[in-house]
Amino acid sequence: GQSLEQPSEVTAVEGAIVQINCTYQTSGFYGLSWYQQHDGGAPTFLSYNALDGLEETGRFSSFLSRSDSYGYLLLQELQMKDSASYFCAVRSYSGNTPLVFGKGTRLSVIA
Amino acid sequence: NAGVMQNPRHLVRRRGQEARLRCSPMKGHSHVYWYRQLPEEGLKFMVYLQKENIIDESGMPKERFSAEFPKEGPSILRIQQVVRGDSAAYFCASSPPGRSNSPLHFGNGTRLTVT
């Protein structure tokens, strides 16, 4: 099976940079995904790393290192609206397996 | 292009009643997934369906829970004889056929409260 570990909570100041780490244990998998979920809302897709390295999309970047079984989501120029839960997720190669999510990191952005 | 539609948004049931949760995937999507989320926790996979087929139900309790995705109409997650522990948010997600690494598109969820 797969397991993913992320910090449960992170607090950061508006305008700052924050990094949310994700370590995982899984056999071959397609890539590492990140989803954002605001309180009471639906999870929404943020980014996907199929290969090692950094992927940048606006203020958000995501990184993957398969050799280290590690990835992170980097949020720059934090805004109050970034306060949400962030989930990393993987899908194994084996068979028709679903996307497995970590327990999520609750980010609080403070003024 | 409408997103994933789930209804009802909120559902209250008394212990022992049945709960039916509906999900219409995005247009063109033939893969449907159901996840359960307890407060302050992550998304736990329940079942993965394609039209008229259950592909993976490894996350679904063996008793009282069932799911279907008929040829016509929405996917249904059915919980019989609900208990308080079934209270949770249930999210449906869909993805297009043929691409195993496609991102999932989630609905707004159904929040089930069992009294």
Image (cartoon, coloured by chain):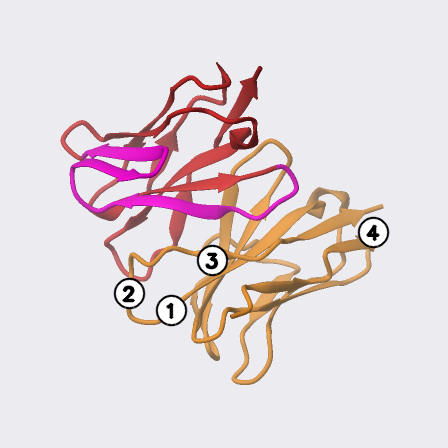
Chain colours: A red, B orange
Q: Quadrant of the C terminus of chain A?
A: top right
Q: Which tag, 4 or 3, sits closer to the chain's start?
A: 4
Which label number is shown at residue B15? Answer: 4
Cα gap from disc 4 to disc 2, whole angstroms: 40 Å
Q: Callout 3, which amino acid?
A: His
Q: Secondary structure at mark 1?
A: loop
Q: CA distance from mark 1 to mark 3?
A: 10 Å
Q: Earlier in the sequence, mark 4 or mark 2?
A: 4
Q: Is residue A33 magenta?
A: no
What's the residue at 21%, 47% (across, down)? A50
Which residue position holds label 1? B96
Kind of residue at disc 2? Arg
Dots 2 and 3: beta carbons under 8 Å? no
- Name which of mark 2 and mark 3 comes first in the sequence: 2
Label of residue B99 in the image:
2
Label pair 2/1, CB-CB below 8 angstroms: yes
Residue B71 vertical placement versus A103 (above, below): below
Task: Report the Cα–Cα distance between label 2 and label 3.
Answer: 14 Å
Magenta stretch, residue numbers:
A39-65
Query: Mark 4, mark 3: which one is toward the viewer?
Result: 3
Quick one: SS at disc 2? Answer: loop
User: Dot 3, crowdedness within 10 Å: few (<14), some or many (≥20)?
Assistant: many
The foreground one among B54 and A41 is: A41
Q: Which residue sits at x=48%, y=79%?
A: B52
Q: Amino acid at mark 1?
A: Pro
Question: In the shown orientation, is residue B36 left or right of residue A99?
Answer: right
Q: Are the residues flagged by discs 4 and 3 from a single subunit?
A: yes
Q: Position of residue B80 (x, y in %)?
A: 72, 62
Return the disc, 1 or 3, that comes first in the chain's sequence: 1
Q: Amino acid at mark 4?
A: Arg
- Mark 3 — residue? B105
